[in-house]
Amino acid sequence: MRQRRARTLFLSVAAYLGLMAFTAFAAQAENLSDGGKEGLFLVLLLAALATLGVTFSITQVGTETILAPGRVDILCTTGTGTGEFHNDKDALATLTLSGCTAWQPVGLGQKHVTKVGCTVKEPIVMKVLILPKKHEGEPYILLEPQGGEATFTTYFLEGPECPLTKENKITGSFVFLMHSEDAVEQLLLASEEIQKLFQTSATLGDHAKFGAFELYLDAHWTVKLTGSHTGLPFGVC
């Protein structure tokens, strides 16, 4: 009788836990379909979530384009950054852009051919808060200004033919698609399409602004862990 009661209790607990797991899965699927959910940073092989002390480096691949549609495209040839995970839910980083020039806007996939008569004051430095996100099963990261500030940085354009004012604050947030859920070298992709995808979501992303105008990034970055964690794969789960 005692064994039968124990077996009945075990089956009841198992059924309850199974129902909880199914409910959690259903809620997660529902959240993904209506805009995504918060993710977690994971360092693999350590079988642990990211913690304070795990550092990383960021390197721009090719030329990054900062687009203020219909007004100006700013091309930057060099981008680097360093950062550290604060915990499994956010990281802090400092990004530096240089080799930046202003060009007349072109269509998607077209080559820039005409420079604009103004210069970009360098270096451009941005201190960012990085948040892990999941959307429709894919890993993303969201970049916001550090410390609750509204502004990433201020672009200073100099010259008599600039299509924008001299001082232009960059505000809002940027979204990057992470190429893999786990990799030693993560490839991050930003584009107008990705940014617009998240602008429709109430829980992920926001408009990025260049002064009063819409702003988008066309960029590829690679990210690697550094220090004692060099060579370990990491990602968003």
Image: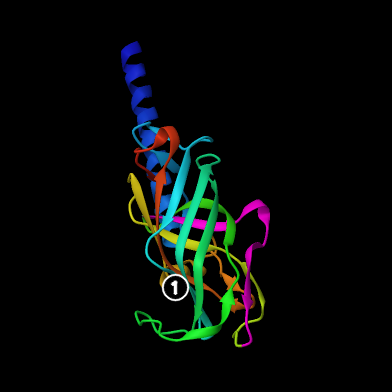
Q: Which residue is found at the position 50% from the left and 82% from the top?
A: 69
Q: Which residue is found at the position 52% from the left and 84% from the top?
A: 116
**160 relative to 79 in the view: left or right:** right
Q: Which residue is found at the position 42% from the left and 85% from the top?
A: 106
State which region is magenta.
138-160
Residue closest to the far top: 2
**107 relative to 66 in the view: left or right:** left
Element at badge 1?
helix
Decide if residue 16 is in sight here.
no
| Residue that numbered label 1 is attached to | 192
Locate the N terminus by quadrant: top left
The picture quadrant where one finds residue 17 is top left
Q: Position of residue 29 (x, y in %)?
A: 39, 54
Q: Is residue 145 magenta?
A: yes
Three-letter code, disc 1: Glu
Locate the C terminus by quadrant: top left
Closer to the camera, 122 or 18? 122
